[in-house]
Amino acid sequence: MPPQPAPTPVRRAVTQLDHRIEAVTGHDIDTLWAYRDRGVLDEQHAQLVDRHRTLASAQIGVTFYLKLLNRLTSGEFPVDGALFPRIDRTVGQLEETADARDAAAEKALAALEPIEAAAPVTPDKGPLSTDDQATLLAIAGGAQLHEHLLTGRASVTASSGTRISYPQMQKLERAGLVVRDTNHPVHAGQPVSLTDTGRAALLDAHRTPTTHTPKSPARPGAWPSTPAKRR
């Protein structure tokens, strides 16, 4: 018999704490989940991953009812007496799942904050690369992080229209050069801005000494050069 096809992996929901967890641990979420399954995490980090999984599961419910509500109000269905009760039920279910998500986020945050407090300060890693400078310049003019409602993919768009890859933004975030405003939902767009450290690093990168090309001294006994006369 032919081998059974591998099951399709379930896409993990993106949560509002992903970037902070990745920044403090130095690992992406998928790697942390894999470490938890293999039993290689200490008790403190294992508790954090368990609570984050609960949060991600609750976020899936929020996304599901949000998509359903968008579908019900998109004009796909006839506006009749049956539609309004469906919308009311969906709004109620969305509210319940959002409350569950918020409660899970509070528990995950309670497990995360002690780890953040104990994390060592990242030392200076030297001058910025050209790519990092260009990214910081784009973010300095304003940028937003968005998560696509259907695909769950995150991307950053600057006010100038420049697109910044999510891994690049995470790299700068881990270095303490940029920060996002998590008070805004990621579906609606989270503003991304430079930190004081990021602004200072950008200024230092552009503070290059001005050099002047020295004039060649005239050879002894040579006439000074004069511009050619136009005929």
Image: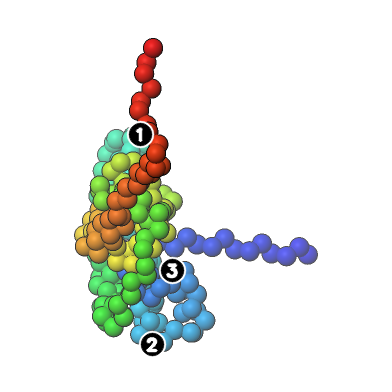
Q: Residues within 10 Å of mark 2 (few under 14, many from 20)?
A: few
| Residue at numbered disc 1 | 224
Viewer-proximal residue, 103 or 71?
103
Q: In which quarter of the image is residue 73?
A: top left
Tell which circle, 3 or 1, labels the residue nearer the N-terminal end: 3
Q: Which of marks 2 and 1 is nearer the N terminus?
A: 2
Q: Quadrant of residue 110?
A: bottom left
Q: Residues within 10 Å of mark 3 (few under 14, many from 20)?
A: some
Q: Nearer the viewer, mark 2 or mark 3?
A: 3
- Amino acid beneath label 2: Glu
What residue sits right under mark 2 in the picture?
A: 43
Q: Is residue 223 visible?
A: yes
Q: Residue at left 33%, top 71%?
A: 124
**Residue 205 point in image, percent of width and height:** 31, 57
Residue furthest right in the image: 1
Front position among marks 3 and 1: 1
The amino acid type, in three-letter code, at marker 1 is Pro
SS at mark 1 in the image: loop
Q: Which residue is drawn at 29% across and 36% down?
A: 80
- Report, in whole angstroms, how far the alpha carbon at label 2 lies from the one at label 1: 81 Å
Q: Where is residue 60 in the image (x, y as percent from the top left)?
A: 38, 60
- Give the residue pinned by disc 3: 28
Give SS at disc 2.
helix
Question: Which callout, 2 or 3, points at the residue further toward the start of the chain?
Answer: 3
- The numbered disc on residue 30 is none
The three-letter code of the residue at mark 3 reads Asp
Q: Is residue 179 visible?
A: no
Q: CA separation, marks 3 and 1?
A: 67 Å
Return the x and y of residue 136 as percentages of the image width and height. 31, 54
- Which residue: 76% across, 63% down? 2
